Image: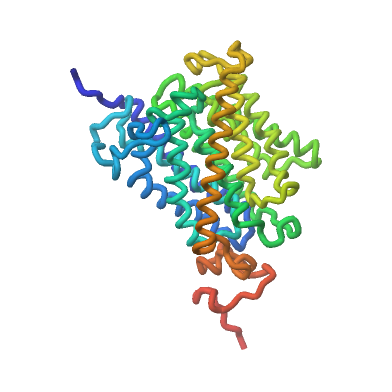
Amino acid sequence: MAAASADTGDTAWLLAATALVLLMTPGLALFYGGMVRTKSVLNMLMMSFVSIALVTVVWLAAGFSLTFGEDAAGGLIGGLDHIGMSGLGPDSVQGTVPTLLFATFQLTFAIITAALVSGAVADRAKFGAWLVFVPVWALLVYVPVAHWVWGPGGWILERLGALDFAGGLPVEIVSGASGLALCLVLGPRLGFKKDSMRPHNLPMVMLGAGLLWFGWFGFNAGSALGANGLAAAAFLNTLAAGCTGLLGWLFVEQKRDGHPTTLGAASGAVAGLVAITPSCGSVSLLGALVVGLTAGAVCSYAVSWKFKLNYDDSLDVVGVHLVGGVIGTLLIGVFAVESMTGGAEGLLYGGGLAQLGKQLVAVVVVAVYAFAVTYGIGKLIDVTMGFRASEEQEQTGLDLTVHAETAYDHGVLGHGAPVSSSVVPHAQKVTPQA
């Protein structure tokens, strides 16, 4: 019998999709960077970019094996078959694509999930603590959940029967629940609910959102793992939901505030894309339109919950990713169609409440697990080395005090705190003229 070989068309598409998903993390860096104040822009960018390096090392060392290795603990975690990517040569095949390519594609999902969490603690986390947090969190939170959902023998996939095409559970809900836990560990920013904390660069936010949307086609359509009709359907559903998410958010803004904003447009598109991520391979085009519209409208309200409940989720990871991920995952149980799933049907298509119940169980378990473990990791780091930047660093800005750089020439001005000469880089010191 001939050995399995990769399909060149599927391989070409997944190569492109992998590059698209990797681009999402720099896109997220711009999206988040534009939303913070001028004094912490570079720190925000760095938290995303360093996540690429940290998660890649962890994934290649153990993450891929523990996620996609043969199940070793009753559906809870994979085995150690491929520690250090052992046994995976260029001729190894996963389905119709090279296993090394499949592993790299899945790596890009792990990277952006870690980077997403940083938005919840913008402006106040120690960079050194973030360097410790990311690899530990990736192994203890992301990897197990990804195995439950996608790995061979994973309990959510094979025992519960909940559906998640491209990452509503391991990416969106995990990042949102983890962000909530971490912002509770660190506490609110100085001046939360008192000072103006408006985005400093909305064009940067819009550019970041555009790059995220572009990369999301690789994220969702690439999850078909082939150049086929399912990829095409996921691609169109992704476009449709992003559009209705944008429109839904703007409609709420206009009715509530009297002004449709660029930040609202960017956030609404992202909310729609978040919600369609788990459902893009399960719902029809009509379902995708409704999923996006629902997420855009609901998330536009959810981002204000932090002011009522007094948790400082700086860049609305909870309001957009957790809430949007929950919406998209649950609505599979309402709008799933057999022509997309190959079997399971949602409530509106004759499937009853069974699939909705499975989706609900998966949502609750993943959210609770991600929150609890992240809170424990965050607390341990906070107790041992401190997770929160000092008050002086936060007031002056993390760019200057941590990275000895500023994003703009005027970056040291107007932040309400004196700047010690010891933290100003030599190249930026100015000698008074006579």
| Residue occupying the point 52% across, 66% down | 402
- Horizontal arrangement in the rendering, residue 290 relative to residue 239 (left or right): right
Q: How is the image coloured?
A: rainbow
Find residue 7 and report its horizontal and vertical position in percent: 30, 24
Q: Residue at x 60, y 39 (%)?
A: 322
The spot of residue 15 in percent (x, y) is 37, 35
Q: Is residue 196 above or below residue 145?
A: below
Q: Nearer the viewer, residue 122 or 246?
A: 122
Q: Residue furthest left?
A: 1
In this rendered view, identify the residue nearer to me: 82 or 415: 82
Q: Is residue 61 left or right of residue 373?
A: left
Viewed as shown, does residue 156 lie left or right of 86? Answer: right
Please identify the quarter of the rendering in which residue 272 is found.
top right
In this image, 81 relative to 150: left or right? left
Q: Is 57 rendered above or below residue 196?
A: above
Residue at (33, 25) in percent of width and height: 95
Taking the spot 67% from the left edge, 72% from the top edge, the residue there is 417
Is residue 284 in sight in this rendering?
no
Extreme front residue here? 74
Q: How many marks?
A: 0
> x, y (%) of residue 269?
62, 36
- For the residue pair 330 and 299, the one nearer the viewer reads as 330
The quadrant the N terminus occupies is top left
- Quadrant placement of the C terminus: bottom right
Q: Nearer the viewer, residue 433 or 230?
A: 230
Q: Extreme top residue here?
A: 350
Q: Where 307 falls versus 11 (above or below)?
A: below
Q: Would residue 157 be visible to someone looking at this image?
A: yes
148 versus 409 height, above or below? above
- Locate residue 9, reporting x and y percent: 34, 25
